Amino acid sequence: MLPKKKSFSWICVLAGVFTINVVALLMSRVVLSVTVDIVNIMAFAILSLIISGIASMGYFGISVFSYAFIFFNALGLCYMYFVILSNKSDGWLDLASFIGFIFIAGFGIFIGIIAELIYRVIKRNKVK
């Protein structure tokens, strides 16, 4: 269950999503035996900070969006590891898995916005 609107517990959500994403992205490179340098670490940290910031938008009261985005972020990470571990894209595993993750996370933003709008419309109609 996600915290209430304007709760400082959202900092824990931000930190948790950030940590999970950084570790998952770095471990994906380790599993692929790809060299990881400071540029990769910084890029993964920045990307994870952006993703965790988006996931923490529930702080402002759009929790349905946050639920949807966190779900699709986790789905994207699982897909990334599925591509890596199933070895379906010989020679392109690092790029194919990462692009799949970004695509699914981006789709999560779209679905989250749609879900939040539907929730708001239903909530508004029930109040009347």
Image (cartoon, grey):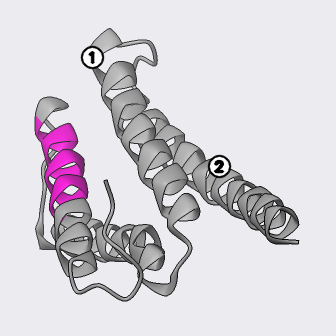
| Quadrant in which residue 27 is drawn | top left
Q: Which residues fall within the magenta stretch? A: 19-30
Residue 4 drawn in magenta: no
**What's the residue at 36%, 75% (across, down)?**
4
Q: Of residues 43 and 57, which is closer to you in this image?
A: 57
Q: Is residue 31 left or right of residue 13?
A: left
Badge 1 amino acid: Leu
**What's the residue at 39%, 74% (across, down)?**
56
Residue 107 marker: 2
User: Residue under circle 1?
Assistant: 85
**What's the residue at 19%, 59% (across, down)?**
22
The dominant secondary structure in magenta is: helix
Q: Of residues 116 and 88, which is closer to you in this image?
A: 116
Q: Position of residue 74 (x, y in %)?
A: 37, 42
Q: Where is residue 100 in the image (x, y as percent from the top left)?
A: 52, 38
Q: How many marks?
A: 2
- Mark 2 vs mark 1: which is more N-terminal? 1
Residue 98 marker: none
Badge 2 amino acid: Phe
